[in-house]
Amino acid sequence: MCGIIGYIGQKEAYPILLAGLERMEYRGYDSAGICTANNNQLFLKKDIGRVKNLKTTLLPGTKGIGHTRWATHGGVLPKNAHPFILDNFTLIHNGIIENHLELKENLRKTTNRAFTSDTDSEVILHLIKKHYQNNLLKAVQKTITQLQGAYAFAVMKQDTDEIIAARNGCPLLIGIGNNENFLASDIAAFIEHTKKVIYLNDFEIATITPTTINIYNFQGKEQKPKIKEIRGNIEQAEKQGYKHFMLKEIMEQPTTIAETLNVPITITKKPNRIIIIACGTASYAGLVGKYLIEKIARITVIHETASEFRYKDPIIKKEDLIIAISQSGETADTLAAVRISKQQQAQTLGIINVIDSTIAQEVEHVIYTRCGPEIGVASTKAFTAQLTILYKLAYHFAEKTWNTEELKKKITETVALNQSIHHLAQKYFHYHNFLYIGRNLNYPLVLEGALKLKEISYIHAEAYPAGELKHGPIALVSENTPTLALCPQDEVYEKTLNNIQEIKARNGKVIAIATEDDEKIKQIANDVIYIPKVENDLNPLIVAIPLQLFAYHIADIKECDIDKPRNLAKSVTVE
């Protein structure tokens, strides 16, 4: 998962490329680099670490490409940072070339060239150099016939006034300016310069100059591009006074949930069976959706992790509704699962945040969550927006209504717990292990809560259904392993209370998230986070917020890099 950007126009390219990389750094931040062209020379600056390491340099030229990397092939070393240069060619790449070892070996035999990195990306540049005969576009067209895997790449030559880009399985879009054009993995990279965008499709190549854009399919036939006007602005992607994007995005949830509640549901046919596919946080939202839809609409729901679904020869029927959930709309495993489902002629629906993303374009129906850009790598407002859409679907299929005005008020009350949860985090940040337990609708929430703690604070956390404690996990209970228990006053309240008693009997510390005015829990748990009382089925939307805040404040006290946690990237566009 990497971010790529290109600029060609009348302005100095380096500052534009640098700013674009900073806005895409959530896609990868192991290393970064920029290459510009000026007076038939290439100028390169790259380094391991963050984009900020490039700020001490200003390279000349009005044409250039840039890259921020999340390592897949090859370690985090200067030699593996992009862009790569070979003679007078330079290239950046996002994705994985699955047959790169075979290609490298063949190139070593036929060209006797040495490779300077451990990456799969460098092989693309060597192939382009090999095939070049005074026409860069034709060299790229010949190269892509040899590549297997997913990729988006851009290449330029020092003495030509063009940048060539190709897409197959990884996001790539073009920004249209006035005597200048852009390409990038993400709109955020150039939104301050233009809102006119062309989304490249898979198996397309683009040639951009300062004044022209030409798009071809992989067979060389010119395509007529669709120009779209995008929404949003640069201010939406700024912190607005918050210490971290993650905190800003947590605190935005009263607004994002309210906005998402206004999204219409237009699917008319009630399915006999639903299969929900997603990864990570979106998968936990999907598991809540399974509970909700089965309970409220009485429809059988199968919940699948997309990375497993795509390889298990799944049973899919034409009558099924496949719901794919992805914040970015680019998640590689979820996209693959959608394509498998379409091959079986099942109906597909996407719950997506990024408009016109790949999954959004490939599904038959799409419902957009109204979150705006989510910059923090650990998903927060997108998760609750996904839950909101799943609630709407459940009630829609059941032909029932629900009181959303009261819910909006309760969400606002919940984010106001921020300061009290900060104080609680000061008491618990030094522990190295946590247990998270919950039952029924609360079980997917403890999975998500434990994931948040792991993602941003690097504290080990295990989540279990509370009823499974005695089947093994209770062996972990000790004074040094606190348990966070979800115990709102719902149908399984007394059962969960019993599980908390079992933990306390073994000298375990318990933090309970419980319904306001619950005096009984106060007498048992070491600490209690009280949440507003709502209808039982709506508890996940409320409970998610203190779980996010608890993880956030522990990570903040530990001085972790919250918005860009180690080893993670926002958009998982490769396997």
Image: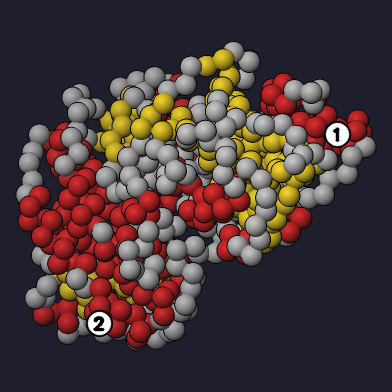
Residue extending farthest to the top is 221
* The quadrant where residue 452 appears: bottom left
The answer to whether 303 is drawn above or below residue 445 in the figure is above
Q: Secondary structure at mark 1?
A: helix
Q: Position of residue 104 (x, y in %)?
A: 82, 38
Tell whether 463 sits left or right of 224: left
Kind of residue indicated by mark 2: Asp
Q: Camera-side residue: 196 or 246? A: 196
Q: Which residue is mark 2?
A: 527
Q: Secondary structure at mark 2?
A: strand
Q: Position of residue 56 (x, y in %)?
A: 64, 65
Give the residue displayed 36% in from the left and 75% down from the top: 553
Q: Nearer the viewer, mark 2 or mark 1?
A: 1
Colour scheme employed for the rendering of this structure: secondary structure
Give the residue displayed 67% in from the left and 50% down from the top: 60
Q: Which residue is mark 1?
A: 107
Is residue 139 among the parts visible in the rendering? yes
Kind of residue indicated by mark 1: Leu
